[in-house]
Image: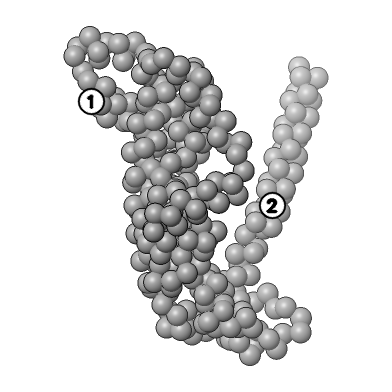
Amino acid sequence: MADYAAIERKAHTLRVIGKTVTYILLTFWALMVLFPFYWMVLSSVKTYSSYNGEYIPSFFTLTPTFQNYIDAFTTVDLGKYFLNTLIFTLATTAIMLVVIILAAFAFARLDFPGRSAAFALFLSLMMIPNELVIITNFVTITNWGLRNTFTGLILPSVTSVFYIYLLKENFGQIPEELYKAAKVDGTGDMKYLLKVMVPICRPTIITVVILKVIECWNSYVWPRLITDNPAYYLVSNGIQEIRENGFGRENIPAMMAAVVVISVPLIILFLIFRKKIMEGVSRGGTKG
C-alpha cells in the first residue's frame, strides 16, 4: 500500500508539473500573439507628437486621446469604405453559399456518370497558382466592362473549391439510407437538402460563412486590381488610400486608429462564433 501511495503521489506531482509547464507555454504564446494588437491599440491612442517624441518605445500612456479615431472618419470617407465592404461581403457570401451547397450536394449524393472523375478534376483546380487565376479573372472582367462595379468585385469570389470539398465531406457523413428513404417517400432532392442535410450540417455551414466573411473583409489584391475609383474601395484598400492621401506616411497613430476600427468587427465576430468554427472544422475533418 505504501508503494502504491508513493506512486500515486509521484504521478500527481508529474501531472501538476506538466500542467504548469503547459500553462506557462500557452501564456507565453498568448502574449506573443496578442502583443501586436495591444501595440496597435496603444499607438492609436497616442498623439502624433508623443509618438514621434519617444526615443525608447513606451508600453503605456498616461494621456490617451481619441482624436485619431475621429480623424479616421473625417479625413477620408472611411464610412463609405465600410458600406462598400459590407455590401461586397454580404452579397459574395450569400451567392457563394448557394453555389457550394448545391455543388457539394451533387458530389455527395447525386449519382451521375463520371462523378468521381469530375470531383478529382475539380479538386485539381486547387493546384493552380492564385496569380494565374487573378490574371484570367482580370482579363475576363475587363472584357465584360465590369471594372469599377460591385458585380466585377463579387463574381470571381462566389465559389471555392476548398469550401465545396469541406461541405461535401460533411454531407458524406450523413447515412445514405436517409436519402434513399426520403426518395421512397417521394421527397425531392431540393426538399431533402434543405430539410435534412442543411440542418444536420449547420455547424460546418456556419463555419464556412464566417471564414468567407473574414476572407471578404480582408480582401485586398483583387479589389485593388479591379477598382481604381475610390467610390468602390473596400476597407482594406481604404487603408492604402488613407496612407497616401489622408494622414500621410508619418502619422502612424492615426493610421493605427483606422486599422483598429477596421479590425474590431472581425475580432468580435470570431469571439462570438469561435466555438462554432472549431466544431464545424472538426466535423468536416471526421469520417464515419
| Earlier sequence position, callout 2 versus callout 1 | 2
For mark 2, give the secondary structure.
helix
Q: Rate crowding at label 2 as few (under 14), some (14 to 19) or many (20 or more) other CA atoms within 10 Å.
A: few
Figure check: 80 above or below 187:
below
Residue 142's place in the image compared with 280, above or below, is: below
- Looking at the rendered structure, the kind of residue marked 2 is Trp
Q: Which residue is mark 2?
A: 29
Name which residue lies at 41% across and 64% down. Answer: 148
Residue 100 position within the rendered picture, expressed as x and y whole percent measured from the top left: 39, 35
Of the pair 286 and 192, the residue shown nearer to us: 192
- Between 48 and 145, the one nearer to me in the picture: 145
Checking the image for residue 191, the label placed there is 1
- Res. 9 image quadrant: top right
Question: In screen coordinates, is 240 left or right of 114?
Answer: right
Q: Residues within 10 Å of mark 1 (few under 14, many from 20)?
A: few
Q: Residue at x 43, y 73 (%)?
A: 230
Q: Nearer the viewer, residue 209 or 62?
A: 209
Q: Can you give x and y, in whole percent of width and height, for residue 47 in the image?
A: 58, 86
